[in-house]
């Protein structure tokens, strides 16, 4: 499983709360199915208070924290199903094996592309593990050691937002299943009841695509931050 906890700090609090809201809603609807969204309005109005709002936020936070590991597994399965690459630079292992077959190559060589120089720096400074998912932790440690806080802060913000969208995608997927099951638990069926499960499933797909993009940005910020830090050290 991905090592997603670096030092996200306050970012993770908000991402966990917001990411857990669809799951909280799914739990409420599984306990008390409604025929339409209008039926939720009286319930919300009758229970609107500061205390209940704080309880809902706390439960959403707990749910968001609990599902982070599950949402990562769910995210990887969707990436395979839709053939989405969540890394900024693809498969580093395949690229590095071809590049390292030529030991005479020099990082400072002007004939090398940026990607080739990056791979050589990674290999010499932190090493390239068999699983690319473990590379982010090595680069993060390198950036901390070299006081690259700007790159780390930007990467962590993207990571926290990625966790939020990842949780949203899983939450909306679960919500669509609950809404679909509730079709057989309510006395009347309306067009809105049929449309809501598919709408929730659509939001699950859209938020998944956004999570892929944010994971790419997170990986990009770490790689570029490492490249410039390692290049300065080499020069």
Image (tube, helix red, strand yellow):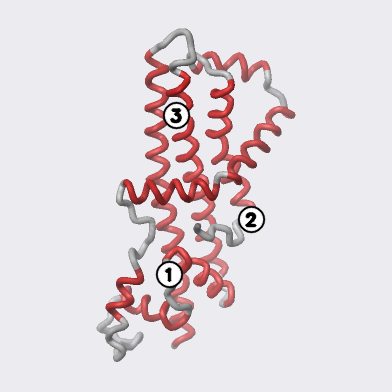
Q: Secondary structure at mark 3?
A: helix
Indicate left or right for 136 with 95 as reference. Answer: right
Q: Give the SS element for disc 2.
A: loop
Q: What's the residue at 49%, 46% (across, down)?
A: 71
Percent of width and height locating residue 171:
50, 36
Dot placed on the residue nearer the N-terminal end, 3 or 1: 3
Residue named by callout 2: 9
Q: Residue furthest bottom?
A: 104
| Residue at 49% from the left image edge and 55% from the top image edge | 158
Q: Residue at the spot x=57%, y=16% of the render?
A: 41
Instruction: Report the disc number at residue 177.
Output: 3
- Contact between marks 2 and 1 (CB within 8 A): the answer is no
Label 1 element class: helix
Mark 1 highlights which residue? Answer: 224
Q: Residue at x 29, y 80 (%)?
A: 99
Q: CA distance from mark 3 to mark 1?
A: 40 Å
Q: Earlier in the sequence, mark 2 or mark 1?
A: 2
Q: Which of pointers 3 and 2 lies earlier in the amino acid sequence? A: 2
Mark 3 crowd level (few <14, some 14–19, many ≥20, 10 Å Cα): some
Return the residue found at the far right. Answer: 51
């Amino acid at each position: 499983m991905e090592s997603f906890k670096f030092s996200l700090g306050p970012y993770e609090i908000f991402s966990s709360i917001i990411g857990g809201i669809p799951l909280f809603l799914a739990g409420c609807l599984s306990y008390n199915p409604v025929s339409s969204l209008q039926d939720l309005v009286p319930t919300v109005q009758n229970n609107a208070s500061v205390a209940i709002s704080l309880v809902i936020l706390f439960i959403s936070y707990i749910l968001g924290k609990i599902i982070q590991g599950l949402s990562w597994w769910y995210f990887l399965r969707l990436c395979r199903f839709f053939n989405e690459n969540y890394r900024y630079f693809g498969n580093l292992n395949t690229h590095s094996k071809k590049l390292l077959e030529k030991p005479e190559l020099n990082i400072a060589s002007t004939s090398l592309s940026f990607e080739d120089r990056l791979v050589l720096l990674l290999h010499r400074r932190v090493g390239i593990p068999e699983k690319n998912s473990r590379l982010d932790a090595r680069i993060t440690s390198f950036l901390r050691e070299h006081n690259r806080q700007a790159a780390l802060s930007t990467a962590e913000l993207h990571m926290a937002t990625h966790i939020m969208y990842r949780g949203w995608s899983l939450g909306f997927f679960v919500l669509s299943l609950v809404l679909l099951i509730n079709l057989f638990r309510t006395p009347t069926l309306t067009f809105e009841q049929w449309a809501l499960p598919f709408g929730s499933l659509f939001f699950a797909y859209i938020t998944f695509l956004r999570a892929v993009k944010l994971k790419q940005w997170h990986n990009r910020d770490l790689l570029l931050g490492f490249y410039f830090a390692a290049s300065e050290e080499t020069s």
